[in-house]
Amino acid sequence: MRSWKVQSSVFGVAGNARDFVLDTVFPPQSLLTGRAVTAGEEEGELWASVTFLDDPCCLTCGFPFEFNEGRNALCGRCAARRPAYDRMRSAMRYDDSSRKLVLDFKHGGRTAGLRVFAGHMRRAGRDILPNADMIIPVPLHPKRLRARRYNQSALLCRAIDKRRFDPDVLMRTKNTVSQGGQTVSGRRRNVSGAFAVRTGAAARLRGKRCVLIDDVFTTGATLESCARALKKGGAKSVDAITLARVVKAQSVPT
Ligand SMILES: [Zn+2]
């Protein structure tokens, strides 16, 4: 059993406040538009506008392919430079349809869709999750955690699998500036060396198959930095699952 102290450190709030964040019952609302819905009302039309991601895709980063190129096919970017993580999969495309859904969850404190999101992430990670030893959320810096009240990646992680959820492996050592609007190389510089394995977690990480959980994959810089830290710390493998990912035509790095 994980201690109460550890749990509350993850969400950055304690006691009743934490329960409020996790358990507040929001009036039934559309997960996409926020409009009130009656219980059981179909949101099929709204969900139909979200692009869910699946095979065929790049074996390593999950970049969706138009045609099936075989299970081991790599996208141009991964063929040119393999990322530090082994495999990454995402549940949905990050675009106009899913943006509101993701941002409401990230900044608005609307955690009502958590179970639905986790279900889609489990589907996206169906080849990754069965063999995982530990499932690790991308951590926030304590300062940002205090401001936001909860770590959205930790909530997703816990909803995916409470048993293998391990929020005390990685820590964010640099309070990086927001990644929004930055170039690929700017994002990489921003998060380079921003994560480290906690001293107390080193022994249980060694030789383990880890899965990182994050909300949005944009350029992959954050996951890259986390995966480097975990591998340096002795992890056997590092895979990742995100709720959403940006998909745009690739320019192969030179
Ligand atoms: Zn790829």
Image (cartoon, rainbow, N blue to C red):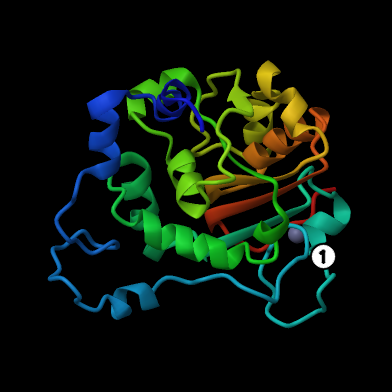
- The residue positioned 24% from the left and 62% from the top of the image is 33
36 versus 166 height, above or below: below
Answer above or below: position of 105 versus 1: below
Q: Is residue 176 above or below residue 96?
A: above
Disc 1 marks a residue whose amino acid type is Leu
| Snapshot quadrant of residue 66 | bottom right
| Quarter of image, res 109 | top left
Front-most of residues 42 and 5: 5
Q: Residue at x 30, y 31 (%)?
A: 18
On the question of residue 27 being in view, the answer is: yes
Q: From the viewer's side, name the closer residue of 194 and 19.
A: 19
Residue 32 on image: x %, y %: 29, 63
Residue 109 in sight in this render: no
Q: Which is more toward the observer, 58 or 119?
A: 119
Disc 1 target residue: 74
**Which residue corresponds to the image point at 36% horizontal and 73% vertical from the top-left?**
47
Callout 1: SS: loop
Pointer 1: residues within 10 angstroms few (<14), some, or many (20+)? many
Q: Residue 130 vs residue 139: left or right?
A: right
Q: Position of residue 137 (x, y in %)?
A: 56, 39
For ligand 1, tell me if the residue under mark 1 lies within 8 Å.
yes
Percent of width and height locating residue 243: 50, 55
User: As drawn, is 93 to the left or to the right of 38?
Assistant: right
What residue is drawn where x is 73% and y is 38%? 227
